[in-house]
Image (tube, rainbow, N blue to C red):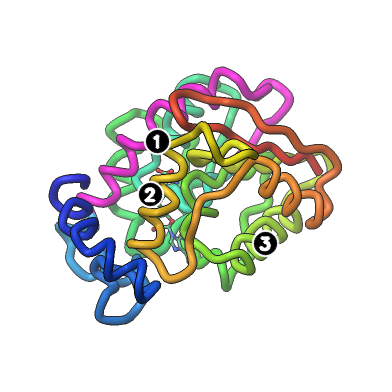
Amino acid sequence: MANARLYAFWGALTEGLKTGEPQNEARTGGEIFAAIYRDPDRLRGFLAAMTAISAGAAHAIAQQFPWSDYKSFADVGAAQGMVPVTLARAHGHLTGIGFDLPVVQSVFEDFVGENGVSDRVKFQAGDFFRDDLPKVDVIVMGHILHDWNLEEKRRLVAKAYAALPKGGALIAYDAVIDDERRQNAFGLLMSLNMLIETRGGKDYTGAECQAWMRDAGFAQTRVEPLVGPDSMVIGVK
Ligand SMILES: C[S@@+](CC[C@H](N)C(=O)[O-])C[C@H]1O[C@@H](n2cnc3c(N)ncnc32)[C@H](O)[C@@H]1O
């Protein structure tokens, strides 16, 4: 993804900074995912790249989060399904849902099948701005909030809150920026990448995300480092 897509788009950084317009497949209008998913090769390539970019975080989330307290989860914007597969393989008592746009279904189901967890991990097609989120104990959003503007971020956090039971948890993971915006260079560069990729997306600090969660009603929030530049922000309802 870095070579075939992003390298050339970063060549138009100046244009992106001047105009605020995306410099990727969505440059001529439309929304990033519709633009990428129009081409089946780009669709598969993008979703496989998501597996690579989320593999480290998936293993850390499987180890660090108290999964024995919960039975079900949904990975909202699951892509190929790296997080659901990793959680299901690590914890035999869990059942999971991969929630994503309908066009992602066959790529997701192939990957889940190859990893031997089709009995416990199912796909649910939906649009997270239009449809209700699955009613499960834990909702995961990986590299989702950074794709969208502030109002959309808050809407997604509120939708997760509405779907969860009391005691349920939202895990949002990204290259969460340190609150002083001085340390996590990868997170700051990823935020600039979202300027190139989207109209309103940007990365965020742990304090910002916890504030959105508290505003949505979450009773407890915390930030936990995962691997490398990634952290998860956890909100418990
Ligand atoms: C940046 S990828 C992140 C994938 C994965 N969570 C990860 O961390 O590797 C964003 C995902 O959100 C999905 N997505 C985008 N818009 C969506 C929508 N409106 N409803 C549901 N899923 C959506 C995309 O198809 C894609 O799989």
Distance from the alpha carbon under mark 3 to that under mark 2: 21 Å
Q: Residues within 10 Å of mark 3 (few under 14, many from 20)?
A: some
Q: Residues within 10 Å of mark 2 (few under 14, many from 20)?
A: many
Q: With 52 as the anchor, is 61 left or right in this view? A: right
**Nearer to the camera, 222 or 50:** 222
Q: Earlier in the sequence, mark 3 or mark 1?
A: 1
Q: Which residues are magenta?
A: 44-73
**Residue 54 belongs to the span the image colors magenta:** yes
- The answer to which of marks 2 and 1 sits earlier in the sequence is 1
Q: CA distance from mark 3 to mark 1?
A: 22 Å
Identify residue type, mark 3: Arg
Circle nearer the viewer, 3 or 2: 3
Left or right of 231 on screen, residue 42: left
Task: From the image, tell me which residue sits under label 2.
Answer: 79
Q: Is mark 1 within 8 Å of ligand 1?
A: yes
The residue positioned 33% from the left and 38% from the top of the image is: 51
**Marks 2 & 1, CB-CB < 8 Å contact:** yes
Q: Which residue is mark 1?
A: 54
